[in-house]
Amino acid sequence: MILFRANSTSSIYVRLLFSMVALCLLITFGSCSDDDAPAEITPNPDSEIYFTGSLDFTSDSGEAILSFTTNKDWSIDVSQSGGDVSWCTVFPNKGKAGESQVSVRVARNEGVDDRNVVLNLTAGDLTKSIVVTQKQKDAITLTTAKFEVDKNGGEIQVEVKANVSYEVVIPEQYQSWIREGSGSGQIIMGDKGHNQMHEPATRTDMDRTVRKFYISKSEEYDKREGEIIFRSGELEEVLKVYQTGGGILLLTKNEYTVSDKGEQIVVELNSNFDFDVKMPQVDWITTTATRSVSSHTLYYTIAPNGTYGKREAEIIYYDRNDKSVADTLKIIQVQKDAIMLSQKEYSVGMEGGTIRIEIKANVAYETFIPEQYRGWIHKGTSTRGLSTSNLSFIIDKNNEYNKREGEIIFQNGKQKEVLKVCQAERAFLNLIKNEYTISDEGGRIAVELNSNFDFDVRMPQVDWITVTTTRSVSTHTLYYMIAPNEAYNKREAKIIYCI
């Protein structure tokens, strides 16, 4: 022990010194006690939800106040997570122990995805995190803003990306030619790569769906425009549909066949424009109307066909502004039916033989031999060309003493041609008496002869027989004068009768 001794004045100073030392020690020990207390961050009631949940902002810019109390100095910073965090700022970013307020500000979110950052509030060795979330900008985007479709129509497909639920609206004035097709609205993989089929309506990435629409064939001459609207509240995207028009020209019947007698035909034609008519350069078709609009009924008069060949002509209906839009009416008039024979009668000798006939016909026909002639007229070979036929018929020998006639008929319906076949009879020549003996005084003899043919008489080359008739028909009596025989020898001569 050290013992200090002092006088009274010194004692006062000593006591004062001890008091000061004790005070310093007390302050020192008190300070050490505060530094050793655990750090605390206590959110004020109005900010407690930010600490337990999150601090949420809409897509617009905004500001929120964090209120809290700490028992130590504090600091706050925006976590650098590798992305852009410049859109979120805090002020002030540090302070003393006690009650404090921090302003959290976010810029407008122009993206189609929501975003978030983490604020780290640190006091001493204690850190609390506050998640700041900002909603995405609601969006519906289309892979194309328009479709151009030809007049024949068809299916179009558009891919829709959206982070909101939406409806498809086809305005009433376009519903007659635009309609949503089957299988439309199928969801495909989201932009993040996961299947969005069962995700809620509000998403952090864009859904992709394929929408299909059917465009009807246009019957309008001019181009037409339509719209398909994809709408979510006040947000909407419009898909424009442009369909080309074009002339429609349609004959209900493109070919008419008219008889050779002629007639009036009625032609019906539909068109969505004024059309022109090109008539053929023929005189057998006449019309009273060459131009009309919309639905048409046109009348044409076809004159009788007096020729033996069919004839054809075309009437062309067309758009003067587009010659490719046209339709053609074909008129076919059949020929005057005819079967023509090279000759209408054939004469055949009694020996018979083959006759050949050239037939010109513009119709199909049948060859017919009546039954009563089939015993001696028969069909032979035939050849046929494009419109000419060569037929042969075999005629048997006529063993009768009378001539005979037959027919060959060529017929097509009411059209008929008859070929007449005449065959000579069997020749007959008979002298009643074949020999005459005359006295030397001469005289006249009468020769009787029967024949069914004309015959010739061949007189002998003598001058003592003369005849007054050398030709006759049927039953004959011929007279000959025999001159006197002044010679001492008999004489003979022959008269020959031949067919």
Image (spheres, grey):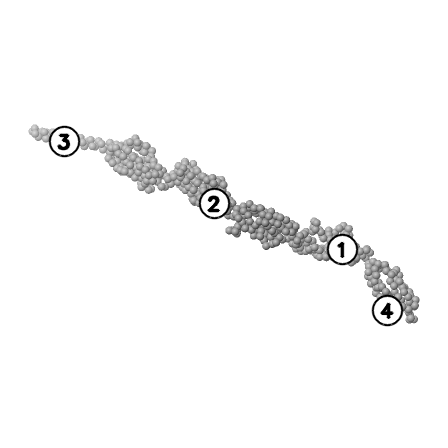
Q: Residue at x 63, y 49 (%)?
A: 263
Q: CA distance from mark 3 to mark 2?
A: 101 Å
As helix, strand or loop, the secondary structure at mark 1 comes to strand
* Residue denoted by label 4: 462
**Which is in the foreground here, disc 4 or disc 3?**
4
* Residue denoted by label 1: 421
* Residue denoted by label 3: 20
Circle 4/circle 1 CB separation < 8 Å: no
Pointer 3 or 2: first along the chain: 3
**Which is in the foreground here, disc 3 or disc 1?**
1
Q: CA distance from mark 3 to mark 1?
A: 174 Å
The residue closer to the viewer here, 124 or 210, is 210
Residue 190 can be seen in this image: no
Q: CA distance from mark 2 to mark 1?
A: 78 Å
Q: Position of residue 429 (x, y in %)?
A: 84, 59
Question: Which residue in the rendered view is the most extreme toward the bottom?
Answer: 487
Pointer 4 or 3: first along the chain: 3
Pointer 2 or 1: first along the chain: 2
Q: Position of residue 407 (x, y in %)?
A: 75, 53
Q: Residue at x 29, y 31 (%)?
A: 44
**Mark 1 residue crowding within 10 angstroms, few (<14) / some (14–19) / many (20+):** some
Pointer 4 or 1: first along the chain: 1
Q: Vertical placement of 128 versus 375: above or below?
A: above
